[in-house]
Image (spheres, coloured by chain):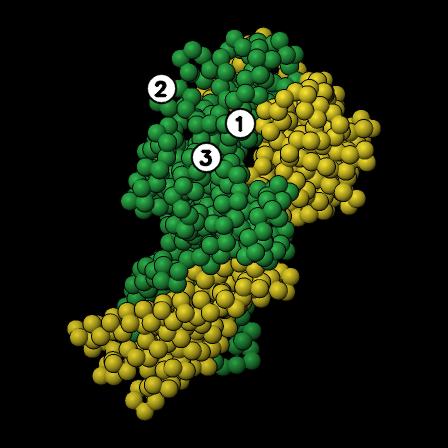
Chain colours: A yellow, B green
Amino acid sequence: MVGKLLGPEIREMISQRDFTSLRSVFTDWSIPDLAEVLSDLEVEEQVIFFRVLPHTTAAETFEYLDVETQTDLLHAMGQEQVVGILNEMSADDRTALLEELPANVVSQLLRLLTPEERTVAQTLLNYPEESVGRLMTPDFIAVPEDWTVSEVLDYIRKHGHASETLNVIYVVDAMGNLVNDVRISEFLIKPIHSVVGNLQGHQITPLKVTDLQNHAVMQFKKYDRSALPVVDSEDKLVGIVTVDDILDVVEEQNTEDIQKLGGMQALDDPYLDVSLLAMVRKRAVWLMVLFLGQTVTASIMGYYEKEISTAVVLALFVPLIISSGGNSGSQATTLVIRAMALGEVTLDDWWQVMKREIQAGICLGALLGALGLLRITVWSAFSSEYGEHWFLVGLTITFALLGVVIWGTLCGAMLPFLLKKMGLDPATSSAPFVATLVDVTGLVIYFSVAILLLRGTLL
Amino acid sequence: MVGKLLGPEIREMISQRDFTSLRSVFTDWSIPDLAEVLSDLEVEEQVIFFRVLPHTTAAETFEYLDVETQTDLLHAMGQEQVVGILNEMSADDRTALLEELPANVVSQLLRLLTPEERTVAQTLLNYPEESVGRLMTPDFIAVPEDWTVSEVLDYIRKHGHASETLNVIYVVDAMGNLVNDVRISEFLIKPIHSVVGNLQGHQITPLKVTDLQNHAVMQFKKYDRSALPVVDSEDKLVGIVTVDDILDVVEEQNTEDIQKLGGMQALDDPYLDVSLLAMVRKRAVWLMVLFLGQTVTASIMGYYEKEISTAVVLALFVPLIISSGGNSGSQATTLVIRAMALGEVTLDDWWQVMKREIQAGICLGALLGALGLLRITVWSAFSSEYGEHWFLVGLTITFALLGVVIWGTLCGAMLPFLLKKMGLDPATSSAPFVATLVDVTGLVIYFSVAILLLRGTLL
């Protein structure tokens, strides 16, 4: 809110080179607010503003900008400015920026870092994408077991600036192995001469650098912590992950899942920031795959062409039948994929889910079948559109709906299990994908029922 | 993990009434781990275990259980045990439990609280559902401006136990109005004689008790904090919201959105915990609405019955045409709904989104149209299924696809705006809903193109 209001004022100060007023802005405002306003300015204005900011404030503000704005700024800033910001940035935010840049830019930027920071940055970038290593920061406070609370407080007062968070203090042994994880709240309420090693922490299973970020999300949900420790393969404490980064991971993962469920590849950037070309490409791939799948329906319809021309009334209900199968499949697949993403359902539950979905499919199919019969009965009372055999047509629709809905529900529920079992992302089993699959088989069900029930009368 | 392994052991201890070993479990284990194991036990075993736990540990462990387990436990526990736990629970978790219970149970439980806790609980429950008030806890540390760091540390050591988090210290004036919000990290690194009022905090716009929880999520994403202050209508500091609750809100909202996108009402509980009846009901409503919408397709098909019986070949492509419209609509609606949920797109952006989606629709429609023409041309080289006028049929399919995809994309993109403008939840514009809408209109587009192109030849 602040942002929208004061953008023009800042613009004014910048164009008038009124550095004194500019300085007052960054002392009065919180950094996230500052970042919000900055992101609405032109890149040249941003560069000027950043020149006025003190080193640490500049780096902190820079961290709150989105990666696109950051990239533009890096291009527009002088080398000295870039050096200042990159070296001051917190290591996890720097990784998030670097991993989005092309390799040659990354190596240029790494050369601008101090040897110390360069080692940190390279180590973090060496962890696999989507791993906890890419999320963590090595800036935490670790203290030996034999210190007292008062010694730790003194230590924090001297060295705390460098830590990403002081919400948790880590206790390590002489080898650097994690011994305890003490929340600052448990720590501050203890007498100042208590020995740290005796404090009752909660021995939390630490994250591993190679863990998937998704695992980290689950752990944060379980432990309700603002930070969790990360250890390497030798159980040495190497970093921490903070919950603000987890919040971003959660939203990103959800966005990906939702976009996949909608039947497309996940966009990597906000909707309005993606170029038209990139967006069309992400959508066209799946749309074409689905289209090619759907052309099978034309062949199936062609196979039953004789029946259709004999009883045109059958063609009238094709959209109704196949979409009912598609909709029930879409519901089932959505439920199962989400339950899997939340860890509520695992591969081992397939049998339980199958039983449930068959039951649900029977209920829903019977319901829609009854509705279909009702529709045709009522319609036939006023019109002769469905001919003298309208009741048989009605029964055909009813049984076809029952079959198609059960089948759609079952396919939708089981496909995510099959994909996961094959090591693929269950979210690929999108609603449109299931609908296409069910359309094809649904037609076969429909015409088979029709041939069975209408032979000798309409067919 | 710990849970799955040690459940049987705990069961053994309980059945043998081996309270000494049980006690060692809760001193060695972290509370979230304890809660994980407990939730796999029978309710009678849980009650016994809770009897062994000290008061505060019992309440803390209880907080980590899900609402269903909590409810079962409340029913199974003796009144004294319930009194102990409810009074010790942190206020925000208690609200989350109470808001799920029927009114008569809530009033019974409220009577068990101490007068002090009862006031707190009632106040929180009086805030509207989905409001920040329902999420917050009144247990925070607030200090006057003129205290020194050292005075605050002494105060925390005495009164910190009661606070939900010590990650942020709130500075208030004599009226109880929020003056500053100082992270513990900024606080601990200052000399101990610094006066609190002089510390540079980040003046963060506080949440209001009546704000929507969704707004709180946005603020947490913006400010990267582990807790945010909440003020009442008179700007008095009345509580704080912690990020662990926000993580739960985010996941819950995403689950709701995903389930709505899948074409059903949101389930309120995990998939496997919902009864079959409740689940069928949540799914049947939308399935029936969509079905009734789809019956319109039968009427439209009936309207074109003469054309279909003259040129049966037209019927063959009905599923292909309408599903292409549905799929492109489903992509567009998914993208827009998600962008809205993340705040990337607001109502004011409708024109920009419309321009984009028309362009995307043209590209995607042209692509599918070309694919369709190719399919028919290739097929006709080997088969006479589509008759002598196969090229005209091919052109009909091509133009129909172009029209249907553009129309589907546009409907899918604009419907969420329309719903939001009308004050409804944009996520109601689910993929199946858009597909049904586009199926109906898509048929009209298809047959209109056919009549236009095939009159005099096939029709």
Say if A104 sits above or below A186 in the image. below
Q: What chain is tagged by disc 2?
A: B
Per the image, the residue denoted by label 1 is: B161
Mark 1 touches mark 3? (CB < 8 Å): no
The number of callouts visible is 3
Looking at the rendered structure, the kind of residue marked 2 is Glu
Chain assignment, label 1: B
Residue A166 on image: x %, y %: 64, 26
Image disc number at residue B234: 2
Judging from the image, what secondary structure is the residue with disc 1 in? Answer: helix
- Vertical side of A399 occupied by A413: above or below: above
The C terminus of chain B, quarter of image: bottom left
Residue drawn at 44 percent across, 70 percent down: A358
Callout 3 secondary element: helix
**Number of residues whose C-alpha sits closer than 10 Å to that of mark 3, classed few (under 14), some (14–19) or many (20 or more):** many
Residue under numbered circle 3: B88
Q: Tell me which numbered mark, 3 or 2, is placed earlier along the sequence.
A: 3
